[in-house]
Each structure stands twice: as C-alpha cells, then as structure tokens.
Image (cartoon, helix red, strand yellow):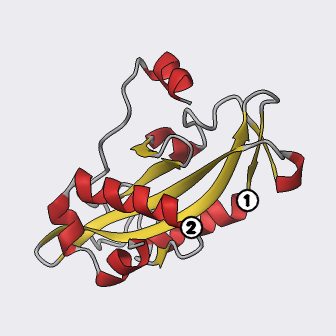
Amino acid sequence: MDDLFKKKTGGKKGQGFNILTSDSTDGHGGYGAGTLNLNNVSPVFVDIEEGEAFVDMGALHARSVVEKGIKFLPNKDEVPNGRPYWLVWVTVDQRNGGPAYTGVAACELTVDRSIRRGYKNFPEHVNNMDRSLKGRIIVDHMDDTSKKILGDYLKKFNEEMWNRSDDKLKEDLSV
C-alpha cells in the first residue's frame, strides 16, 4: 500500500478533516434545503497491515487511492486474498464549546490489487455515512487492533476534539 500511495499522491497522505464549514441552508427553507451536507464528514482509512490511519477525501465518491482501479464485488468469498481495511466515516461538529468527533461509523473493505477486485458492501457504506452524519458511533464490530489504530489517530490528530467527544466513542475505541 505504501508504494502505491506514494506513487499516486507523491507521498502526501491526507491529514485534514472537513471541519465545520458554513451551512448554506441556514434554515431558510429555500433552494437546497433538505439536501445532504457532506461538509463535516471525512473518510478515514484504517490500514490494518500497515498499522496506520489516513484521511482520503476521494472516498466520498469512491475514488480514494485504496479504491481506484478496483472492481468491487458484493461477495467477500470472491476476494479470498484481499487486504483488509476499514473505511470510517468521521463527522465533526460543535460539542462542548468547540469542534468534536460527533459521529464515527466503520465499514469493512478488502482489496486484492493482483486481480483488481475487492469486497465492499455498498449499502453498509452509504448507511454508515448517514449514521455518522446523524451522530452515531458504530465501531463495536471492528477488531481491537483497528480500534486502537483509529483511536490513536483521532487523539493524535486533535486532542482537544478528542477530549470534547462523547464518552461512548472513547469507551468503544478503548482496547
């Protein structure tokens, strides 16, 4: 993964979250009201084998470095040698006097570059993005190693945002 990432991005891993942009619909009820606003959600990949996490905004449109050039299949058995990842939708919003991680929902993903195939449950990815936007924490199905990688990444990225986050997130990511 590291070589692929360096080749495609010049070695620059995304480090930024989308944080609290102004809302164009501000309650006016006119054009655009009721549309889904993705300004506060960021896709974080957990690479289990490398033991790292990184943001790749391309995942919002299934165009991340991990996903590019891969045909995703709905059956995990068709990709037996797939490299495991977690795609975690992280929503940032105001809480306790400042920005905090308010929604975190993880989705399983595997990629086998040698056959250019992968496994992804598309409805789960869409639904978990929505659940993250609604402030839900869905990480209990992750393995302990991945939880630790994600928790460490979120803490390291911004400790103040981590401290303002709900205790449920901290508990669910503690190993």
The residue tagged 2 is 142
Q: Nearer the viewer, mark 2 or mark 1?
A: 2
Q: In the rendered view, would you say 9 is above or below 129?
A: above
Helix, strand or loop at disc 2? loop
Task: Estimate the x, y position of residue 81 in percent, counting from the top left.
Answer: 79, 42
Q: Is residue 141 visible?
A: yes
Local crowd at mark 1 within 10 Å, few (<14), some, or many (≥20)? Answer: some
Gap in angstroms between the C-alphas marked 2 and 1: 15 Å
- Quarter of the image that includes the N terminus: top right
Question: Which quarter of the figure has residue 175?
Answer: bottom left
Residue 168 relative to residue 141: left or right = left
* The residue positioned farthest toward the left in the image shown: 97
Q: Amino acid at mark 1?
A: Asn
Q: Position of residue 153 (x, y in %)?
A: 33, 53
What residue is at 46 percent from the left and 64 percent from the top?
147
Q: Position of residue 108 (x, y in %)?
A: 64, 58
Of the residues shown, which amino acid type is indicated by label 2?
Met
Q: Nearer the viewer, residue 102 or 160?
A: 160
Looking at the image, can residue 75 be seen?
A: no
**Who is closer to the viewer here, 163 or 128?**
163
Residue located 45% across and 40% down the image: 56
Mark 2 touching mark 1, by CB under 8 A? Answer: no
Please report the residue visible at 40 percent of the width from the left and 76 percent of the height from the top. Answer: 135
Q: Which residue is mark 1?
A: 121
